[in-house]
Structures are given as structure tokens and as C-alpha cells.
Image (cartoon, rainbow, N blue to C red):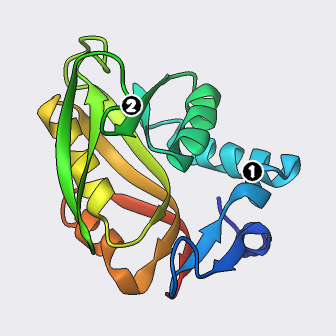
Amino acid sequence: MFTQKLKAQLQETIREVKDYPRSGILFRDITPLINHPVLFSRLIDTLKLRYQHHSIDFVVGIEARGFILGAALAYALGVGFVPIRKKGKLPFKTISAQYQLEYGSDSVEMHTDAFREIKDAHVLLIDDLIATGGTALASLELLARLQAKCLEACFLINLQELGGLDKMAEKVNTFSVLEYPC
């Protein structure tokens, strides 16, 4: 369970970087958290407790920091890990889904055989942060196209005012560890 004390400790390790990657953005940098052996372990252990009885087949992580959280959690749960990557980064046959950005569009991809032919694979989608929800919604589209059942979408950080978690909650169960105003 994420106690207020644990949440406060996690929040204290997340660095805020002004004007990154461009002017006007306040970037939440999780590298100090993942560099902290005790707090990172507590984060993964607490997520494991949350999901250990959910019959999860795979943890699906969204590039790039979702890989860090997702791979560690998949290991802790004893299940497979599946990456969702930016276009052109996966070496085998892929499917893709496009999403809108403020300044255009982008797409994410995953391997067509990501779930090793397990029908109706039960998956947990994870990423470090949800803002507007574009990447996460595109990831959900990929999961649906491969007939996986997303049991929940989990985010370390929810930027509340941007509404991404609310958009996701219309389609799937959601959970965020930390809530931030923009």
C-alpha cells in the first residue's frame, strides 16, 4: 500500500527541471528515484503487492522510462515484459498506432508476436508519467489490436490538469502513485 509517508519520500526524489525539453515545460525527472536503491525497491515491492493477485501475464512498458519500471515490476511478478517503442525501433514485424502531439503526430509500435500467442493475454500497462494521454491511448489501441486484455494502466506520476488519466479511465482501470498539478 502506498502510504502518505512513502508517497512523500518518492516525491522528494523526483527532480523538477524547468524549461526541459523546451521553454515553459516543467519536466519531472525520475532518475534520482531509480538511482535510490531503497526507494526504488520499495516502489517496485509496493506495486508488486498491488498486482500480485491480478493474474497478469505480461507487464507492458511504454518507451522509455516505462521500460525501467515495467521490467523491474515484471521481474518482481515473475511475468514477461513487453516494450512499446517509438516508430522504427523494433527489429521484427510490428503494428503501430498514431497519436497527436501539440506540434504534429507520432506513433508507437509493438511486435506482433509480443504475447507469444497467448490468447486474451492479461496485461498491465505502465509508464512513468501521464500528461495528455496520447501515448498511453495509442498503446491501449495496440493492446486491443493484439487482443490483449489490459487489466489496468499504471503511472508513477499523473499531471492532473492535462487530463490524460481521465481519458484513460474512460477505457480502462487506471492507477497513479503520485498526483501533480501542472
Between the C-alphas of marks 2 and 1, the distance is 24 Å
Residue for point 52% across, 84% down: 23
Q: Toward the viewer: 147 or 36?
A: 36
For mark 2, what is the residue?
A: 89
Of 80 and 106, which appears nearest the observer? 106
Residue located beneath label 1 in the image: 34
Q: Position of residue 163 (x, y in %)?
A: 32, 79
Q: Amino acid at mark 1?
A: Ile
User: Disc 1 on helix, strand or loop?
Assistant: helix
Task: Kindly give the residue lying farthest to the top in the view shown.
Answer: 117
Whether residue 12 is situated above or below residue 145 in the rendered picture: below
Q: Residue at x 49, y 87 (%)?
A: 182
Name the mark on residue 7.
Answer: none
In x, y percent, where is residue 173? 31, 57
Q: Amino acid at mark 2?
A: Lys
Element type at mark 2: loop
